[in-house]
Amino acid sequence: MKKGQVYEGVIDRVEFPNHGKILLPEEERVVTVKNGIAGQRVKFSVNKVRKGKALGRILEVICPSDMEIESPCPHFGQCGGCTYQTLPYDEQLKLKEAQLKEMMDGAVTGDYVWEGVRPSPLKQEYRNKMEFSFGDEYKDGPLALGMHKRGSFHDIVNVPKCQIVDEDFRRVLACTLEYARESGLPYYHRMRHVGFFRHLLVRKAAKTGEILIDLVTTGQFDFDKDFGGKEWTSRLLSLSLGGRIVGILHTRNDSVADVVQDEGTEVLYGQDYFYEELLGLTFKITPFSFFQTNSLGAEVLYETVREYIGETKDKVIFDLYSGTGTIAQILAPVAGKVTGVEIVKEAVRAAKENAEGNRLSNCSFWAGDVLKVIDELGETPDLIVLDPPRDGVNPKALRKITDFGVERMVYIACKPTSLVRDLEMLEGRGYRVERIRGVDLFPGTYHVETVCLLSKLNVEYHIEVEVNLDEMDLTAAESKATYEEIREYVLKEYGLKVSNLYIAQVKRKCGIVERENCNLPKSESSRQPKCPLEKEGAIREALEYFRMI
């Protein structure tokens, strides 16, 4: 088997996240492809072959799976936003449950209660936020506004009939694209760094129906004179919508990074926030603050958290990685005190304001890195809720968290593989998994939230043993690939040279414990260079390839 060869095969199974497995008996290999469904016969090309493993890209679905139906979305297959639109929703849930259960069974020591995957209350039109991108449908083609084409960094697919948002989103999208085309102004070219239009951000509350619209552009043209911001605003306000527009904004972003970044926001109409309601509480949401993108699904998720955390009367609860403080405020009415810690200052400000608006006096919020802030809180929690970002918890922070020795801990994972990694340390530090439940907040995609309840082992019947890694030659993870093998992989696949120091730094971030004397500077005054982001990403990919994370 060589790179570039084309084969046909049937996808035997799909592992998380979205990794289809095709067995080729004649080659005695299993090829991994993305965006496939078990049972599909596909034509695919081989992209990578290394150490007995092969990665491929689907070129054509020759024969669909027996489970598939016609997609309700006409853009499915071109748009990269969804993966499972051709699967009936009950089959999507079965797939996610099987994948999640397999991962948890492999990660958890001993018995635990598996509670399946709870469905989203809405299967379609469930999202309360969308970030649409400007670009062209093909090179030098007409202006487009929508989602990135599947497998493409540049091409944009117009999505006027997108099914994961409601009709109000679609009408705002169509109105903005039509007006942008009339203006004759160019989109921002990601490679040349010239142009005007970048993103359209639309947010709509499921409960209140309030809508916030934000057009993100560069400052390379005058927004009022060249574009006509007042006319665009007027057209939006004249739309017949099911909800109510409460704010229309313009944000400038001259950053070269292809992300929505606020470098100055002007209110064109109304206000720069809207309100949403969850479980009887009201939350003020700004354009860039984090809030679960499926409001009704979030209620199912937070009800699970409230159920798992159990008795909270007179208890002190730490809500770590608290975002805008949603979980903290949902727990506050039945707790003694709740303290939230979040690194994003804007989110902390919003959390404080929302707590005040909900008349919750037993909530406090700290801005800063969990690793540093928990040493400054000055109190010991009775219970802890963890809702970390996709990469999970910093291993050093996780060690400090477990040092509190709380009786119960609830871990919410938006990326199950991060939970799998962190469970190794949590169990090693004396915690036992009691219950696990998935909650589907993203129908049509492979994403799934996971909620895990852990309890402290009974110290009368368990003894914690600390192993000195200095006395061991290699950790289990280290034994899977040497530093030389990782360096060779990164050089071959990415053309980058990386040092042992950079590899060690990334391994630590990923929770792979190094020996204390590994790659330390020769003197205390020495300053170690930090691994650049580009090289960090390449090293992480190598660690995944060698199944070290």
Image: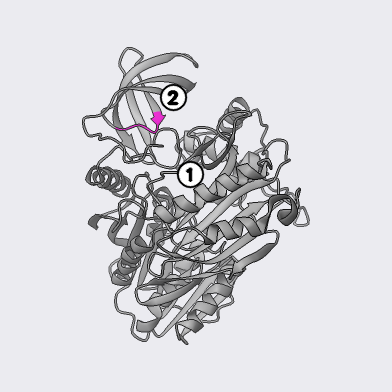
Mark 1–mark 2 distance (CA, rounded to whole Å): 31 Å
Q: Report crowding for label 2: few under 14, some 14 to 19, many 20 or more residues within 10 A (C-alpha).
A: many
* Residue 437 place in picture, x, y as percent: 28, 58
Q: Main secondary structure of the magenta part?
A: loop
Q: Position of residue 542 (x, y in %)?
A: 53, 35
Foreground residue, 335 or 427? 335
Type of amino acid under label 2: Gly
Q: Which residue is mark 2?
A: 56
Q: Residue at coordinates 37% horizontally, 83% vertically from top-left?
A: 333
Which residue is tagged 1? 475
Q: Residue shown at 25%/34% (left/top)? A: 68
Q: Which residues are magenta?
A: 33-37
Q: Residues within 10 Å of mark 1 (few under 14, many from 20)?
A: some
Left or right of 333, for residue 246: right
Say what amino acid the circle numbered 1 marks: Thr
Q: Examine the structure image and report whether residue 34 is included in the region drawn in magenta.
A: yes
Mark 1: secondary structure: loop
* Foreground label between 1 and 2: 2
Task: Tell me which numbered mark, 1 or 2, is placed earlier along the sequence.
Answer: 2
